[in-house]
Image (cartoon, grey):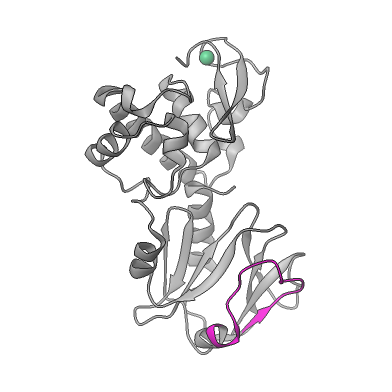
Amino acid sequence: MPELPENEAQRLTLERECLHRTIEAVELGEDVTYIELPGDNERARLVGRQFTETRRHGKNIFAGSKTGPWMTVHLGMTGKLVPFDAPDDPPDHTKLLIRFEGDRRLAFQCPRKLGHVRVIDDPASYLEDEGLGPDALEVSCEQFVQTFGSTRSAIKSALMKQDKMAGIGNLWSDETLFQTGIHPEARANALGEDVLSDIHAAMRRILKGVVRVEASYEDLPEAWLIRHRKSGAECRRCGGTIVSTKVGGRTAYFCDKHQK
Ligand SMILES: [Zn+2]
């Protein structure tokens, strides 16, 4: 599932390819019964408008303008925003197609369930209604220590709770704990302030690193877990073995030697 850095890369794509172009039509794709998409009236609100800015909070992408309305996209498991130019055809599994003036098009491609597109008035009140915590790249160290220092659940599960902090999922929680040497099942409130500060710093460094390469994983350092994230692989930090276990229903990968 796309997390903060993958969504940030998609936001950048929108920013580069889709701003300052008048929207001529917003059309539904094929086989859209199982996915939440804006209805006729909501889609009509976008027609004649231009996106002039983009934002991202956690795993939510926004495109809109000062006076609104805004479009918000959640990529779900496998969603993707694909800009292209007519007369090229939209990609397979296009659920929503925006036609801008001229040839530019934007497809929301989503082969599986989950994921949605909504038309909203403004991002700030939307985020409040959704009950999301602060974005993982915005949360301060103090806030982070306070939030997770008072959480009894396993640290991996806690990091993925979007109402505590938005943007982290399975991949980057594993990477953060791998790089700080913390076992994914360690209780968050037993870790102490210093360790939580270390986790916060590592998380920021990792997220910024992935954003920098626009989520192109092969450009990340060899020593990172993401490059060897499978059971039985050798840990490039300590020579231990990468193993997996279920934590809160999700598969966590970690090193059996240096993550205590
Ligand atoms: Zn190791």
Magenta stretch encompasses residue 5: no
| 258 and 185: which is toward the camera | 185
Quadrant in which the C terminus is drawn: top left
Is residue 32 at all visible to an observer of this figure? yes
Res 222 → quadrant: top right
Residue 157, compared with residue 60, is above or below; it is above
Pinpoint residue 168: horizontal percent, then vertical percent: 46, 43
Residue 131, compared with residue 120, is above or below; it is above
Pinpoint residue 103: horizontal percent, then vertical percent: 65, 80
Pinpoint residue 235: horizontal percent, then vertical percent: 57, 16
Q: Residue at x 44, y 44 (%)?
A: 161
Main secondary-structure element of the magenta-colored stretch? loop
Pinpoint residue 107: horizontal percent, then vertical percent: 65, 70
Q: Residue at x 71, y 57 (%)?
A: 112
Q: Is residue 253 left or right of residue 176?
A: right
Is residue 22 at all visible to an observer of this figure? no
Q: Is residue 131 left or right of residue 16?
A: left
| Residues drawn in magenta | 26-42
Q: Is residue 206 left or right of residue 47?
A: left
| 195 and 158: which is toward the camera | 158
Q: Residue at x 36, y 31 (%)?
A: 152
Check the image and name the residue furthest to the left: 142
Res 65 → quadrant: bottom left
